[in-house]
Image (cartoon, rainbow, N blue to C red):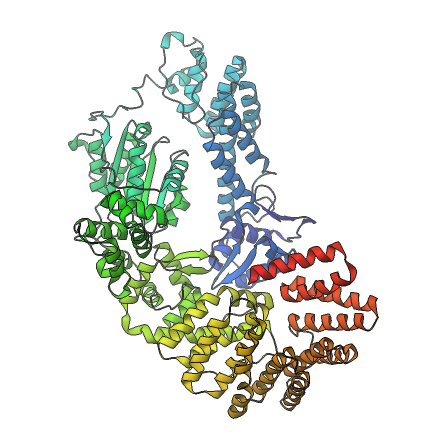
Amino acid sequence: MEFRLLGTVSIDTLSGPLPLGPAKRRSLLAALLLRANTPVSISQLTDALWDDEPPLHARTVIQGHVSRLRALLTGADAEAYEVELTTLGDAYLLRVPESLLDSQRFEELLMLAREQRSATDTVLMLREALALWQGPALTGVFAGPPLQAAAHSLEESRLATVEQLASAYVRLGEHNRAAAVLRAEAVAHPMRESLAAALMTALYRSGRQSEALDRFHHTRRLLADELGVDPGRELADAYALILRGDPGDGPRADEAPGPVQLRPARVAADVPAPVVAAVPAPLAPARAPAHPGVDPHTADLLPRAPRGFHGRLPELASLSRAAAGEAPICLVTGPTGIGKTALAVQWAHRNVAAFPDGRLFADLRGFSDTGEPEPLEILREFLLALGVAPRRVPESVPAASALFRSMTARRRLLVVLDNARDSAQLRPLLPGGTDCVTVVTSRHRLEGIIASDAARPVPLDILGPQDGVALLAGVLGEERVLAEPVAARRLADLCGGLPLALRVTAARLAGRPGRTLAGTAAELADEQSRLAYLEGEDTGVSAALRLTVQQLPPEAVHHFARLGHHPGGHFDPYTAAALAGSDPVTAATALERLGAAHLVTESAPGRWVLHDLVRLYARGLDPDAAHEALVGVLDHYIATALAAADTAEPGGEPCFVLPDGFRRPAAVRDFSGRAEAMTWLATEREDLTLAAAAARTAGLDDRSWRIILLQWPQVVWRVRDNWTPMLETALAAARDLGDPYAESRVTTLLGWVLTEEGRTAEAVTLLERSPGLARQAGDLLGEATALINLAIVQAEQGDLEPALEGCERAIELGRAERDAHTEMLALQHIAGMQLAAGRPEEALDAARAALDLGPEHEEAARRVLLTTICGEARLALGTKSEGLRLLERAAQEAEDTGFSEGAVRALGALFQVTADPDHKRRYERALLRLSDDG
């Protein structure tokens, strides 16, 4: 599956392009792909689909197109490609791996091309990038203003790539190839001066001087006739190069053309007067542009290089790649204390030679108690550093900004703007030269500057354990760290890889040479005092976080504070809403705000995490809300797990009595089918376990056992996946409550798991009590399930008759309660017992009776096992072809649904009879999956 924007907007599959339908639907797809993996609001889609007043039913039209597009993707098996079109509040999100989107691959190839040292490799990368284009970008869409702008931007990128390819050919000395690449584009874009200039130069250097001059005069006349302007500097420079017969190969592909020193005596007599006027007069060297009142010298405002800087080699390389473009803005982002400033300054000092015209630095104090500096104050400092006389510094921001851009237009300059709060703060401070590099650091993502100025993000994450220990050693000395390597690693872990926390810890230890690292680690292990310990004399984790939080709106702060009381490690908008007492749409907006401020991190689409130290800080913002937040999230887990269990295994009834004081969430996740429900249960298993443990600690045992027991579909599906410890926690909670209903339900499931683990003696001890507990609670269906699970153990121990009697009693109880699910379960086990006892006829009768009871949506696991029993019984009765057919059907369904245990049983039975290599291969794969699944 491939998504195309570089040409006709389309979705290509192995069987051909999907039928997207009308232009409006293509436009909607294009709008979603242009912001792939980012929510696109209804209002943004409306702007893209209508260029005038949208109709009153615009939202309905959009919903209809989304519905049709979603159906097309589903029909094309988009899920297998990790493609998903989801609704998020008042927005839509199209999740697409970048490798499937041609515009993303185009950008990736351009980045790779910039990294190549060999011009030959650069040519290969650029040609591959241009080969992705199959016509004008966004063909076939409704050309509203937003999509027109996007198409124009993509086309500009393509033309720039063509020019880069030509420059690479020039570096190889292949000027004819450069001219061939440029000619078609110059004809299609006759007033694009950069194309004309490059084509002129390529023609001239390939010995075609007259063609080069003809191209100049043709372009000059077009500019005069169409726009009333003279040629610009780039075109005039190329013309002057030809006139003076410059024999050189010109600038390298990665450099802009330098200034031209004209010699009037060499200018031909027939040059028209307007052209002579347009050719630049002799210029000063690029390092010292002529400006009145300027004292040219190299400016350097960088602070000193950070002491004890360790690691960050991938991030330094990413910053170098981001700085390799034309007039790039590199955006170093990350949470409080992650080391953004240290990275930017370290990179600047390592690359001083790349910026011979100066290095400027300003702290924008976007997250400071002291307030932000005025833009004019920063511009004045920059201009003075560049040599402008104090009396000539303008007194308004626009004028000072314009002078700064003019001063930097022909320089190779680095500008570091530290601690930016928002994009608006940056724009007056950006230099004007194409050879200038701007490095910005911020706790926010600053999507505005990414959108308006193509800033390249360089996200910064926590330090790895090895780099964390190295940072400690850089402050404390290697000997002290090597003396306690385990404690040093423990300190790095407790500081969560956060450089600020590591430096505060190291500073405390440096001032106490007699203090051991192990003793400090023991202090930090106490969550109650950890943040207090990580406060330095004038800095600290809490202080830095406070400055970030105070920039947030109240609703985001409220959600942030409640997230601190989350007992688990991950959360989604539903979980955040339950903690905060809000709704998922409001919570999603808050999470986006918190994510932009790097207070939470999106670990997977729609799934977020908190750094340990950030969690401790958030918890302290509203400590009195701990119980309310915990009850909210526990009840959210109960409601969602109930929905998941009901979707995954319809007809089951593990826990239908809600706890006292149950707080129903504002919204409960809707599962589209069994696969989605089972995925949620598997993904949330760790957090559900943590939530159950937190409930136990808080005395909420009525929530604890329910949260655990509601995972029964996963327990059944992955029975060997070490469920016993968790179920023992549930049993302890049930017993502490003195609730026979809860104890019976938990005991029945735990006893079955122990049986499957081969711990039959323990299983019998538990299961013998379970039916009586269920009767005491008046739980007839619970009693039936308990009898069935006890019968399984009895049959394994050779007590077949008591086992069959127990199952028959379970059938009676199921019929009395009109519960076909329980009756079917009992019949399934009777069939299995009869088959094991060498009674295939009775086994076949019981299995058929069970299958007759099961509705079409009965769970796949039970259907697979019953079909397998039927197949094995048929083989035992001598009807081999029918037995093989049934076993193959069971094996296929087990493989299709991911029921590895069922696949092992069915394929094992097949292989024993057929010795078919394919059956053996599939059996071994299923066995491997079963082992991997636990």
Residue drawn at x 47%, y 63% as measured from the top left: 90
Which residue is nearer to you in this view: 610 or 140? 610
**Residue 753 screen position, x and y as percent:** 55, 74
Q: Is residue 898 above or below residue 874?
A: above
Residue 711 image offset from top left, x and y in percent: 52, 72
- Coordinates of residue 589 in the picture (x, y in percent): 40, 62
Q: How many marks?
A: 0
Residue 46 location in percent, x, y?
50, 56
Depth check, front residue: 21 or 362? 362
**Quarter assignment of residue 814:** bottom right
Q: Nearer the viewer, residue 153 or 210?
A: 153
Q: Is residue 100 left or right of residue 552?
A: right
What residue is rendered at 24% in x and 48% in y?
Answer: 365
Q: Is residue 427 visible?
A: no
User: Is 519 positioned to the left or the right of 808 in the image?
Assistant: left
Relative to 780, residue 311 above or below: above
**Quadrant that contains the C terminus:** bottom right
**Is residue 823 at least partly visible in the picture?**
yes
Above/below status of 844 relative to 60: below
